[in-house]
Amino acid sequence: MQYRTFGSLDFKPSALGFGAMRLPVLAGADGKPDFKRIDYPQATAMLRRAIDRGVNYVDTAWMYHEETCEGWLAEALKDGYREKVKVATKMPVWDVKKPGDFERILATQLERLQTDCIEFYLLHSLDAAHWECVVEQGQLEAAEKALADGRIAHLGFSYHGTHDLFEDILAATDLWEFCQIQLNYMDEDYSAGRRGLELAAGQDLGVIVMEPIRGGMLARNLPPAVEALWAEARVRRTPAEWALQWVWSIPEVSFVLSGMSTMRHVEEDLEYAERSRPGLLAAEELALVARVRDLYRELGPIPCTACRYCMPCPQGVAIPSVLELYNDAHMYGDASRQRFYYTWLDEAERADKCTACGECESKCPQGIAVSGWMEKAQAFLAG
């Protein structure tokens, strides 16, 4: 395993961190995946395999797997594994609505994780609305108190807002020691972006990169034109490795979080991490990645990463599934197949049940105008 620096902290993180947002799950009574029912044996085996191969950072959050992930993680790290890793979890800042909520949620997280101290604690998914929650409810002051009494060791934030706000948040307090941003070759200028990465690293903050493969979209169901571009490369890599190595090649990146769903993902990502180096990709390889990026931008109309922050929908719409079907139909030029798959969705989950309430749009890290796309998707997929 390769290890990197983490800002000014005395911690050498593994190049690959274990993201616990997309764990394998069991089926519900209806036969569909139940994201609240983590497959404990499989997920635990995956995590322990990663740790055995050198991964030393595990990331979870209050909301992951419908608030069951932190409890799973505590169990998965038993039998001597807890001492081998640093654990990160996140405060759902939007749920802090009155005095005492921050303390209550943190106490619950400590209990779920079966610990007295969380090593790395993040204010979750900051954007303009969520930052307003932080300021109005005094959450930085509450976090400072938790730092002082040892319930958390290091404070950071995960980010999904604009670049200008990112700068403002960095300057808001000297409590920050690290941050977590979305970065991949498709989103170099999105949100904090490459500029934000360099700014934070220049202030000696550790910078964690999430969504390096854009929720898996850069690795599966490749359009033929994209496959043809990758085939031109002199060095053979899978599309997933191209995406990861692009991020790892950036010196300012502390490490990459990968949300792995199968043991195969774990094994592959471990191999890629062992080959990673800052500056690994040559100029001609970076140029090839840029060509792939430009082609994808021509093909995919909706920038959804299937992170599921929009779920559950109050009306029951299967938002990520609908957006994926719409995107796939346009990227792969096979509308008939995607329209057929659309019929597999329960009628209650289809786009025409959207009432444009806007709740999903307030949660979407990509800023997608979901209700508008639901109307377009219904017209296209049900046509």
Image (cartoon, rainbow, N blue to C red):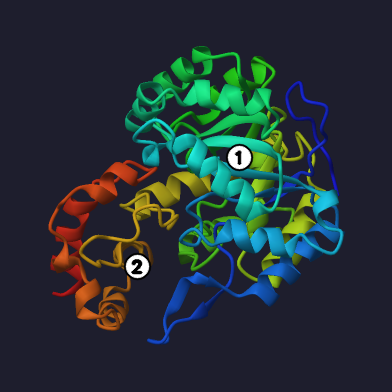
Q: Where is residue 356 in the image (x, y as percent from the top left)?
A: 14, 53
Q: Name the residue under label 2.
A: 321
> What is the three-letter code of the residue carrying label 1?
Val
Please tell me whether mark 2 sits on a helix, a strand or a loop.
helix
Please tell me whether mark 1 sits on a helix, a strand or a loop.
strand
Tell me what residue is drawn at x 63 percent, y 39 percent.
286
Tell me what residue is drawn at x 45 percent, y 75 percent.
34
Of residues 13 and 221, the one nearer the viewer is: 13
Q: Quadrant of residue 256?
A: top right
> How many residues crowd around disc 1 within 10 Å: few (fewer than 14), some, or many (20 or more)?
many
Q: Where is residue 232 in the image (x, y as percent from the top left)?
A: 63, 55
Left or right of 277: which side holds 335? left
Q: Can you say whether 212 is above or below 230 in the image?
A: above
Left or right of 241: which side holds 333? left
Left or right of 260: which side holds 352? left
Tell me what residue is drawn at x 38 percent, y 67 percent.
332
Q: In which quarter of the image is the C terminus?
A: bottom left
Q: Can you say whether 383 is above or below 295 in the image?
A: below
Give whichever of discs 2 and 1 has the lower sequence position.
1
Asked whether the residues under the numbered discs 2 and 1 touch, taking CB atoms below 8 Å apart as contact, a structural biologist would say no
Q: Position of residue 305 (x, y in %)?
A: 44, 54
Of residues 243 and 255, the one nearer the viewer is: 255
> What is the three-letter code of the residue carrying label 2?
Ser
Left or right of 222: which side holds 327? left
Alpha carbons under labels 2 and 1: distance apart: 25 Å
Of residues 253 and 141, the one nearer the viewer is: 141
Confirm whether residue 185 shows in the render. no
> How many residues crowd around disc 2 within 10 Å: few (fewer than 14), some, or many (20 or more)?
some
Confirm whether residue 66 shows in the render. yes
User: Which label belongs to residue 209?
Assistant: 1
Q: Position of residue 88 (x, y in %)?
A: 65, 43
